[in-house]
Image: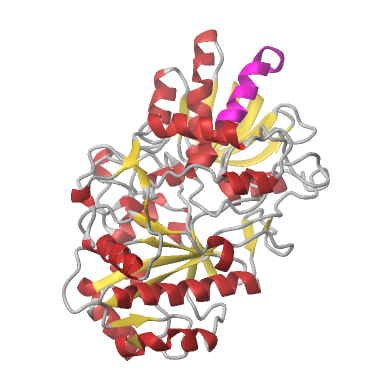
């Protein structure tokens, strides 16, 4: 086993890890040695081909097929240089004041988080996209919402030079999306931070980590790791965990910290979601322009759901539609004419839902759909169908109905259909990409894992800086909030660097 030593080691390179790396990188000029350890590969620009299965295998954990313990929900999260910022659509929303207030974390103020979030929104060129990049799928969503009197809103996104390829979820082939892979990590490296890819951290000890570097597989995408393949012991004076809401709790559990941190792994939420599609009589421009431009959140508090425009490719769409046989085939044959909406449930912390590990130390997510979450998904599906028909759709796919095909002539009966709706886990294809919790912030180790700056209770040299810090669901895309929390962790490390390093 090779042995190395650094002053600061950051595990993970996504929204949290990339931010911490940039904000701590000036310490390199004072002689500090800082490394970012990323499990996934670093792809060259010309390797972002936009081919669905090829890119999913290269950029996502388990190729995008990570399942909950009972197999009823797919969890999608990035595993590459830049983490999930390389594979999401760029939506960048300020943390809601109501949510931060309800978290009730001592020392965490909404005004501070918003100020930090705005800093990174400016840094990452967040803005409302140009009218020319808004495709027909998004325009139909706006049309349907407005006809129904719904308060549709436009997403701010972090893009620069977008060509409207709509391939955001497969890694932008035009380098337009301004994630940590394009902004924070390159700046950190320019200042002297080392980024080591294909490096999986196995355990954490007393100011030390064990890690395994793997070789680039034959024919695989991405550059080889800058380190030779093999096992490493890495000594570090400060360790920052930014491996995400699944892998950060799992790493701490593998490292034997359950006893001192009883809340470790608990508090997991995910915004369970499914795709709604509807057929129109004429083709819809969905593969051109930015795919996710508008959302509807006016029912988040009353009915527990949020709707977003979306565009998914044929394979994902096919596996995301409920049922089989002729009804399923009919919608797939109509693919060029499909309008799409993503329904997200605003789930809350449930005692059962948590991150654990199996006998081999691999993360396992236990998740059950509460009655409130199920109601949110059903109400979201019915509202989506109303929007579809208001926008002129001739039929809609209804995954929670006994008959999954709803014709336009049935639009007036949607509430009756909702009353009879059924949600059977495993029958309705559900996925989630806003994974949160597991190392929640709070006042002490009995009720939380870290303080408001992400420092693990009782371990002054160990920090967390990712979405696992959330004490409960954020109800929106967590990207900018993660960056704001990571900025707080970096500030505390800089302040205490003379004592810790």
Give the vertical position of 234 relative to 279 (above or below). above
Q: Residue 428's x, y, as percent?
A: 49, 78
In this image, 56 relative to 494: left or right?
left
Instruction: Give yes or no for residue 403 being in the magenta stretch.
Output: no
Q: Nearer the viewer, residue 336 or 49?
A: 336
Please tell me which residue is depicted at 48% across the width and 44% down the height of the picture.
479
Q: Main secondary structure of the magenta part?
A: helix
* Quadrant assignment for the C terminus: top right
The range drawn in magenta is: 487-501
Tell me if residue 228 comes above or below residue 39 in the rendering: above
Q: Is residue 116 above or below residue 321?
A: above
Choose top left, top right, bottom left or bottom right for residue 134.
bottom left
Image coordinates of residue 259 in percent, x first then y, are 83, 47
Residue 305: x and y in percent read 52, 65
Q: Is residue 493 magenta?
A: yes
From the viewer's perspective, is 239 left or right of 51? Answer: right
x then y, percent, for residue 446: 83, 46
Q: Residue at the location (77% across, 44% down)?
A: 257
Quadrant (top left, top right, bottom left, bottom right) of the N terminus: top right
């Amino acid at each position: 086993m090779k042995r190395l030593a650094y002053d600061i080691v950051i595990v993970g390179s996504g929204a949290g890890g990339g931010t911490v790396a940039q904000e701590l990188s000036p310490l390199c000029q004072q002689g500090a040695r800082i490394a970012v350890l990323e499990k996934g590969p670093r792809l060259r620009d010309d390797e972002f081909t936009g081919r669905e299965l090829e890119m999913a295998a290269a950029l996502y954990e388990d190729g995008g097929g990570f399942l909950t313990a009972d197999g009823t929900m797919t969890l999608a999260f990035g595993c590459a240089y830049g983490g999930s910022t390389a594979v999401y659509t760029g939506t960048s929303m300020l943390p809601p004041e109501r949510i931060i207030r309800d978290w009730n974390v001592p020392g965490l103020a909404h005004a501070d988080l918003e100020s930090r979030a705005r800093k990174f929104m400016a840094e990452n060129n967040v803005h409302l996209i140009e009218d020319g990049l808004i495709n027909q799928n998004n325009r139909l969503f706006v049309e349907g919402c407005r006809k129904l009197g719904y308060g549709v809103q436009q997403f701010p996104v972090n893009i620069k030079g977008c060509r409207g390829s709509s391939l955001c979820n497969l890694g932008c082939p035009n380098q337009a999306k301004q994630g940590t892979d394009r902004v924070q990590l390159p700046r950190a490296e320019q200042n002297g931070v080392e980024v080591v890819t294909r490096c999986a951290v196995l355990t954490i000890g007393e100011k030390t980590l064990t890690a395994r570097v793997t070789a680039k597989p034959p024919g695989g995408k991405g550059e080889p790791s800058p380190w030779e393949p093999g096992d490493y012991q890495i000594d570090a004076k400060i360790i920052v965990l930014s491996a995400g809401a699944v892998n950060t709790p799992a790493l701490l559990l593998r490292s034997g910290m359950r006893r001192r941190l009883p809340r470790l792994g608990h508090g997991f939420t995910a915004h369970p979601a499914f795709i709604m599609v509807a057929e129109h009589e004429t083709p819809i421009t969905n593969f051109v322009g930015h795919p996710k431009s508008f959302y509807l959140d006016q029912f988040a508090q009353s009915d527990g759901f949020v709707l977003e425009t979306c565009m998914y490719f044929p394979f994902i769409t096919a596996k995301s539609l409920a049922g089989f046989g002729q009804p399923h085939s009919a919608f797939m044959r109509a693919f060029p004419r499909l309008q799409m909406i993503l329904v997200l449930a605003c789930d809350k912390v449930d005692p059962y839902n948590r991150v654990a590990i199996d006998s081999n130390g691999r993360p396992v997510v236990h998740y059950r759909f509460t009655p409130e979450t199920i109601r949110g998904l059903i109400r979201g599906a019915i509202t989506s169908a109303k929007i579809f028909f208001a926008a002129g759709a001739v039929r809609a796919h209804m995954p929670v109905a006994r008959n999954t095909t709803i014709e336009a002539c049935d639009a007036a009966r949607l509430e009756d259909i909702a009353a009879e709706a059924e949600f059977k886990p495993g029958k309705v294809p559900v996925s989630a990409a806003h994974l949160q919790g597991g190392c929640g912030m709070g006042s002490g180790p009995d009720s939380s894992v870290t303080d408001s700056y992400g420092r693990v209770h009782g371990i002054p040299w160990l920090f967390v800086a990712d979405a696992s810090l959330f004490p409960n669901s954020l109800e929106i895309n967590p990207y900018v909030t993660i960056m704001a929390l990571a900025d707080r962790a970096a500030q505390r490390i800089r302040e205490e660097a003379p004592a810790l390093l």
